[in-house]
Structures are given as C-alpha cells and as structure tokens.
C-alpha cells in the first residue's frame, strides 16, 4: 500500500486537510484533462474513441478514515498521504477489453505521470468477481509552496465491468460490507455474465468499430456537402440548385458511401471552379 517514492516531506508544511485536498483536486483536474487530450488525439489519428466515459472523484473523509482503519493506521494527514492510494481517483470506462490495455499503455507513456503500481484484476479477478485494471500513478502539482507530488489511482474497465462494480459497491455499502451469501453468489454469477458479454462483444469488435468509422466518415462528408450546397446557392441559378439538391437527396437515400464520396468530391470541384 505504501510507495516511498511519494515524498511525504512535501506535505509537512501543508498541515490542514483542505489545503492537502486542494492539491489532490488540482492533480485530478490535470490528469483528467490529459486523458481527455489522449482520447481526442487517438480519435483524430485512428477515427476511433477507446474511451467511452471518464469520471473522477476525491475520496470522502469518511472513506479515507475507514480505509486507514482497515489497514491498521491511525487517521492523520501524514498517514493518508502516505498510505491511501486513491484519494484522487479516475475511472475510465471503455467498450472492449482490449481497449483497457491500450489505454493503460497510453497512460504509461506520459512522461509526467510515474507509474507506481499496476493491478490487473482482469487476469486475477477478486473473490467477489471484481474485474478491472488499476494503475497507481504519481503526479507533480505546481503550487505556491513549490511542487507537490501526489498519487492518483486510475481504474480502467469495460462498461459491463463498471455496471457490475457500481451495483456491487452499492450493495456493499447497504450491507456495511457483509453482503448475505446468497446475494454474493448471485453477484458472482452476474460478474461471470458480464465477463462473457465482454468476450462476445470482442468477437464482433471489428464489425462494430468499422461501422463507427463509417458513420464518422459519412457525418463529415455530409457536413461538407451541406456547406458546399450553401455556398453554391450564391453562385448557381435556381434550376441548377434544384438538380443538385435532388441528386443529394438520391445519393443520401441510397446509403451508398462511395456515391456519397463521389458526390462530395464533385461538389468540392464545382465550388472551387465557381470561386475562381
Ligand atoms: P471506494 O469506495 O470505491 O473508494 P490500495 O488503495 O490499492 O492500496 P486496496 O483497497 O487494498 O488498497 O486496493 P484495491 O483492492 O485494489 O481496491 C482499490 C479500489 O478498487 C477500491 O477502493 C474500489 O474502488 C475498487 N475495488 C476493489 N475491489 C473491489 C470489489 O470487490 N468491488 C468493487 N465494487 N470495487 C472494488 P475502496 O477504497 O475499497 O472503495
């Protein structure tokens, strides 16, 4: 649980709770922005979004105290900074199991994020049935008092795993950690069902991602065509415009991406010719 590479001395002069939490909040915002940019860059390069959803939170004081107690430590700012790895936590949900490793890899390539530990609860699911991939990172925040290093835990999982973990977490809270055995067994079955869903979805992954790519290409071409039609309104007579609108309608209804591409290119040339 302890990573000595996080220099506790940094926090010696920060001795009130709110100031310490402020540093964690700043780290959380910066790392979340970093993840958002990574996702945007991936989308730009590969026309595919590995990340479906990102959620971040600061652990509540109650939960920090409980965790310290669970691990046998007294409640103090020193102990919380040293021993609690997930005061700042980011949860990333994605569509496919393979995206998890892709995202973890992108994160580990960031040179201002140091990886302190990885926990692969997909290869080694917990007894409860919990599956996820955790990366505990160290991030340096610039403050008025100088740089402060804090830990940020990033949990990466599929939407099916997340659905299960959220439900199980609520039940754990409801039963104060003592979920009745019968319910535990059913939850375990649900975890297996979520695992099989992820496996099945992975087998049709290519089909799904191709469809997503095609939709994106279609969306961009349509937007470009509409833009060109708007420009041509000022350049062509009513009769020609009406023919173009009719052709667009036919091409669009044909659902044929090649026809749409050919029409788009033709309009690009037409606009260029009239512009000159
Ligand atoms: P909460 O309320 O979600 O914050 P570590 O901090 O890594 O040194 P720990 O707790 O032994 O200490 O690590 P572990 O087991 O990797 O758990 C870290 C977090 O993973 C947990 O934080 C949960 O968010 C999640 N997690 C782990 N096991 C389970 C599980 O069986 N079910 C669910 N739903 N989530 C799990 P907290 O502080 O326990 O909880």
Image (cartoon, rainbow, N blue to C red):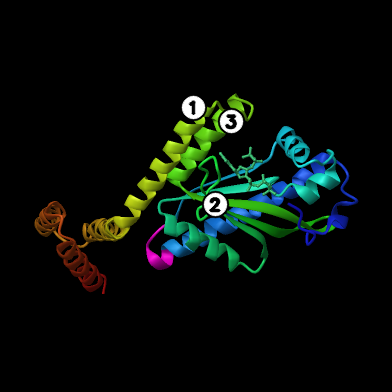
Q: Position of residue 4 (x, y in %)?
A: 80, 59
For residue 118, the mark is none
For residue 121, the mark is 2
The response on whether ligand 1 sits within 8 Å of label 2 is yes
Q: Is residue 216 above or below residue 111?
A: above
For residue 172, the mark is 3
In the image, the segment drawn in magenta is 44-49
For residue 182, the mark is 1
Q: Are marks 3 and 1 in contact (CB under 8 Å)?
A: no
Nearer-the-camera pick, 65 or 1: 1
Q: Secondary structure at mark 3?
A: helix
The response on whether ligand 1 sits within 8 Å of label 3 is yes
Q: Secondary structure at mark 1?
A: helix
- Label 2, label 3: how far apart the Cα atoms are: 18 Å
Label 2 or label 3, whichever comes before in sequence order: 2
Q: Position of residue 60 (x, y in %)?
A: 70, 36
Q: Secondary structure at mark 2?
A: loop
Q: Is residue 142 magenta?
A: no
Which of the 4 image quadrants contains residue 77?
top right
Q: Residues within 10 Å of mark 3 (few under 14, many from 20)?
A: some
Name the residue: 52% across, 39% down: 165
Name the residue: 57% across, 28% down: 179
- Label 3, label 1: how far apart the Cα atoms are: 14 Å
Nearer-the-camera pick, 11 or 144: 11
Q: Position of residue 95 (x, y in %)?
A: 41, 51
Nearer-the-camera pick, 65 or 266: 65
Q: Is residue 186 above or below residue 244?
A: above
Mark nearer the viewer, 2 or 1: 1
Label 3 or label 1, whichever comes before in sequence order: 3
Which of the 4 image quadrants contains residue 207?
bottom left
Which of the 4 image quadrants contains residue 31?
bottom right
């Amino acid at each position: 649980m302890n990573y000595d590479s996080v220099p506790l001395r940094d926090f010696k002069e920060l001795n009130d709770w709110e100031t310490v939490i402020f540093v964690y909040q700043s780290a959380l915002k910066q790392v979340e922005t970093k993840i958002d940019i990574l996702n945007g860059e991936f989308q730009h390069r590969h026309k595919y979004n590995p990340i479906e959803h990102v959620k971040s939170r600061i652990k509540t004081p109650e939960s920090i105290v409980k965790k310290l107690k669970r691990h046998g430590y007294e409640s103090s700012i020193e102990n919380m900074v040293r021993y609690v790895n997930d005061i700042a936590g980011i949860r990333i949900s994605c569509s496919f199991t393979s995206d998890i490793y892709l995202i973890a890899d992108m994160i580990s390539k960031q040179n201002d994020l140091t990886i302190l530990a990885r926990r692969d609860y997909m290869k080694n699911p917990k007894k409860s049935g919990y599956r996820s991939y955790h990366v505990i990172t160290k991030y340096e925040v610039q403050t008025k008092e100088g740089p402060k290093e804090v830990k940020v835990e990033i949990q990466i999982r599929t939407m099916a795993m997340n659905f299960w973990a959220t439900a199980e977490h609520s039940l754990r809270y409801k039963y104060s950690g003592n979920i009745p055995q019968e319910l535990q067994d059913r939850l375990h079955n649900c975890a297996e069902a979520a695992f099989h869903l992820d496996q099945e979805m992975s087998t049709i992954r290519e089909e799904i991602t191709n469809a997503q790519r095609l939709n994106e290409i279609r969306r961009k071409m349509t937007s470009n065509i509409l833009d060109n039609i708007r420009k041509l309104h000022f350049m062509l007579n009513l009769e020609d415009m009406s023919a173009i609108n009719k052709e667009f309608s036919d091409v669009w209804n044909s659902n044929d991406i090649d026809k749409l591409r050919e029409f788009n290119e033709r309009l690009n040339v037409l606009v260029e010719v009239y512009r000159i």
